[in-house]
């Protein structure tokens, strides 16, 4: 295994709030990662929040740490849980201007043409055929939901209330809900989840007013209140909202706030690499926006950074938006003539898509009243 420098040949970065954020990237998945220095140990923040990603490791450390200070990276490898490995190295500080980074991580993706369809009354689907600043193709899919006529519903395996340990493909979750009388017309994937363990979701999950995972989660989510009002929120901001939720599916970064790119740091590789992405947003007038970007297939679609994703959501009119699970999880389905059609092309390779549809913990179903 090799530890390499992920950003501008640096290993730690100064956050806007004055804390230092150490980023360590590994070529192989590692577990139980920590940093140790002068008798102190720092936990792996990123993998606490992202149980599926074992290649990027983020640590918040005191701002007084001097440049060049040697830290020890401790970890275990898969199937070697008792064998703690260590690697020591010095960090070099980077003081990055955020506006410069936001410009740098903007892929310049622009639509060249689009195809629009009405999936159902109040539910509009659009396929954007785009090019980025290198002229490479990017395919983007969006759903606009008029919440006077449709809403969201938390799709789960068997349309049930299992907390952990169960996964299903999005079309299986669609079918299960339809069999129970739910009028599904479209779907996209949902929360991050533990791909390597018990499949537990990373954030809050609410279904039919019942909390089925992570009641204490502080992550941002797309929710529908019992009165039908859509929200992008976090229980850290509004804990009382939990009692009002009918459905909720979580994401991670709040990428749009008040119609602008939110003040999050795009410095770790997860944020600035062009991946397949999925996002959910809410407009000022109460519409729900769902967006999915295909990626990792160079001759077909090249993905998006979180900066790209935020700008796309703003262009669609989002007042708030949250980044959902992406990568091989990103999918878009719409109902056509009594059957559900896969609109997107899931990562990672351009081959028969049925072999690539990932089993997931939950998804977002768009349902007609």
Image (tube, rainbow, N blue to C red):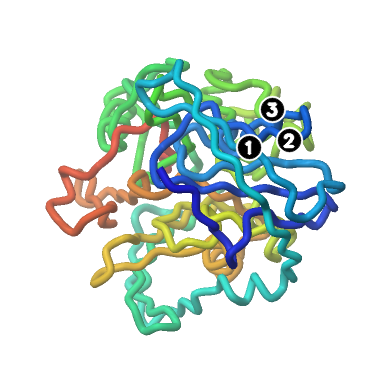
Which residue is labeled 2 in the image?
37
Residue 161: x percent and y percent? 44, 16
Query: Where, by quadrant of the figure, is residue 114 drawn?
Result: bottom left
Instruction: For residue 284, say whether it is visible.
Output: no
Foreground: 138 or 179? 138
Q: Nearer the viewer, mark 1 or mark 3?
A: 1
Which residue is labeled 3 in the image?
244
Residue at 64%, 21% in the rendered image: 215
Residue 282: x percent and y percent? 61, 53
208 up-or-down from 236: above or below? above
Residue 261: x percent and y percent? 68, 64
Mark 1 and mark 3: span between their CA atoms? Answer: 46 Å
Query: Where, by quadrant of the figure, is residue 339 drawn?
Result: top left
Residue at 54%, 32% in the rendered image: 86
Which residue is labeled 1 in the image?
72
Dot 3 or dot 2: first in sequence order is 2
Dots 2, 1 in contact, CB < 8 A: yes
């Amino acid at each position: 295994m090799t530890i390499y420098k992920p950003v501008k040949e640096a290993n730690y970065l100064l956050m806007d709030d004055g804390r230092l954020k150490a980023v360590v990237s590994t070529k192989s998945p590692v577990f139980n990662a920590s940093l140790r220095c002068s008798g102190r140990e720092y936990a792996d923040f990123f993998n606490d929040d992202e149980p599926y990603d074992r290649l990027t490791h983020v640590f918040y450390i005191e701002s007084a740490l001097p440049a060049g200070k040697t830290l020890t990276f401790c970890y275990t490898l898969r199937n070697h849980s008792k064998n703690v490995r260590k690697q020591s190295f010095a960090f070099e500080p980077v003081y990055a201007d955020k506006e410069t980074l936001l410009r740098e991580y903007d892929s310049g993706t622009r639509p060249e043409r689009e195809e629009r369809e009405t999936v159902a009354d109040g539910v509009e689907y659009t396929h954007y055929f785009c090019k980025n600043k290198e002229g490479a193709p990017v395919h983007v899919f969006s759903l606009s939901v008029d919440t006077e006529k449709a809403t969201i519903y938390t799709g789960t395996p068997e349309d049930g209330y299992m907390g952990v340990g169960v996964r299903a493909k999005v079309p299986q979750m669609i079918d299960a809900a339809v069999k129970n009388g739910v009028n599904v017309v479209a779907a996209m994937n949902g929360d991050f989840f533990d791909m390597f363990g018990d499949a537990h979701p990373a954030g809050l999950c609410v279904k039919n007013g019942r909390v089925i995972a992570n009641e204490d989660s502080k992550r941002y989510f797309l929710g529908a209140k019992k009165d039908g009002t859509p929200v992008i929120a976090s229980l850290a901001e509004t804990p009382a909202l939990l009692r009002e939720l009918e459905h909720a599916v979580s994401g991670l970064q709040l990428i749009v706030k008040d119609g602008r790119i939110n003040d999050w740091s795009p410095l770790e590789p997860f944020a600035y690499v062009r991946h397949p992405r999925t996002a959910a947003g809410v407009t000022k007038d109460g519409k729900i926006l769902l967006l999915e970007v295909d990626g990792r297939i160079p001759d077909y679609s090249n993905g998006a950074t979180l900066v790209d994703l935020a700008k796309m959501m703003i262009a669609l009119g989002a007042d708030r938006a949250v980044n959902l699970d992406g990568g091989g999880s990103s999918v878009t389905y719409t109902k056509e003539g009594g059957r559900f059609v896969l609109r997107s092309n899931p990562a990672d390779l351009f081959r028969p898509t049925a072999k690539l549809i990932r089993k997931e913990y939950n998804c977002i179903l768009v349902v007609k009243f």
